[in-house]
Image (cartoon, rainbow, N blue to C red):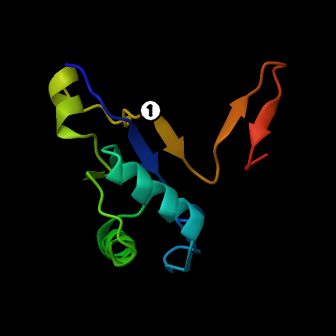
């Protein structure tokens, strides 16, 4: 199965919203604008957050108020489940956007916001 789009997973607290759980906070307008452009280009969006229950519903509605509608919430896309024959707990995506993300650079040093 060839996928002609990117899958982008994005966190809510501290990433989409400058919030302190369970509050909703102010929007990260530059990130929202980026995600809206990616969605308009045919890419898929996953909201990937630790929120559940009412705090999750509040976050989804908050995002919708800013025009963000996700292809999945805390779950893989249906086509990914079909491709692999199961629904792994790990989200399959091309890009993770999270305020706590880090990576190891070519010199073996940790880089990122959480350092």
Q: How far across and down, in percent of the image, does residue 16 sit? A: 52, 64
Q: How far across and down, in percent of the image, does residue 14 sit? A: 60, 64
Q: Quadrant of residue 27?
A: bottom right
Secondary structure of the residue carrying tag 1 is loop
Image label count = 1
Q: How far across and down, in percent of the image, does residue 54 sit? A: 31, 76
Report the residue at 63% width, 44% height from top: 101
Choose between 110 and 68: the one closer to the eye.
68
Tell me if 86 is positioned left or right of 64 in this view. left
Q: Is residue 62 above or below residue 77?
A: below
Report the residue at 19% width, 22% height from top: 83
Res. 46 visible in picture: no
Q: Quadrant of residue 88?
A: top left
Q: Rate crowding at label 1 as few (under 14), some (14 to 19) or many (20 or more) other CA atoms within 10 Å.
A: few
Choose between 4 and 111: the one closer to the eye.
4
Res. 68 visible in picture: yes
Q: Is residue 39 above or below residue 20?
A: above
Q: Is residue 105 above or below residue 75?
A: above
Report the residue at 43% width, 55% height from top: 37
Q: How far across and down, in percent of the image, does residue 30 sit? A: 58, 64
Quarter of the image that includes the N terminus: top left
Choose between 65 and 38: the one closer to the eye.
38
* Residue under numbered circle 1: 94
Report the residue at 44% width, 32% height from top: 94
Q: Quadrant of residue 7?
A: top left
Q: Is residue 95 above or below residue 57?
A: above
Quarter of the image that includes the C terminus: top right
């Amino acid at each position: 199965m060839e996928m002609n789009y990117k899958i982008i997973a994005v966190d809510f607290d501290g990433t989409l919203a400058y919030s302190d759980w369970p509050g909703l906070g102010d929007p990260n307008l530059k990130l929202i604008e980026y995600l809206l452009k990616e969605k308009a280009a045919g890419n898929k969006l996953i909201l990937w957050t630790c929120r559940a229950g009412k705090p999750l519903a509040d976050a989804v509605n908050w995002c919708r108020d800013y025009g963000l509608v996700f292809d999945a919430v805390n779950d893989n896309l249906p086509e990914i489940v079909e491709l692999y024959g199961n629904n792994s707990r790990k989200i399959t995506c091309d890009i993770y956007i999270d305020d706590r993300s880090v990576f190891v650079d070519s010199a073996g040093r940790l880089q990122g916001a959480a350092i």
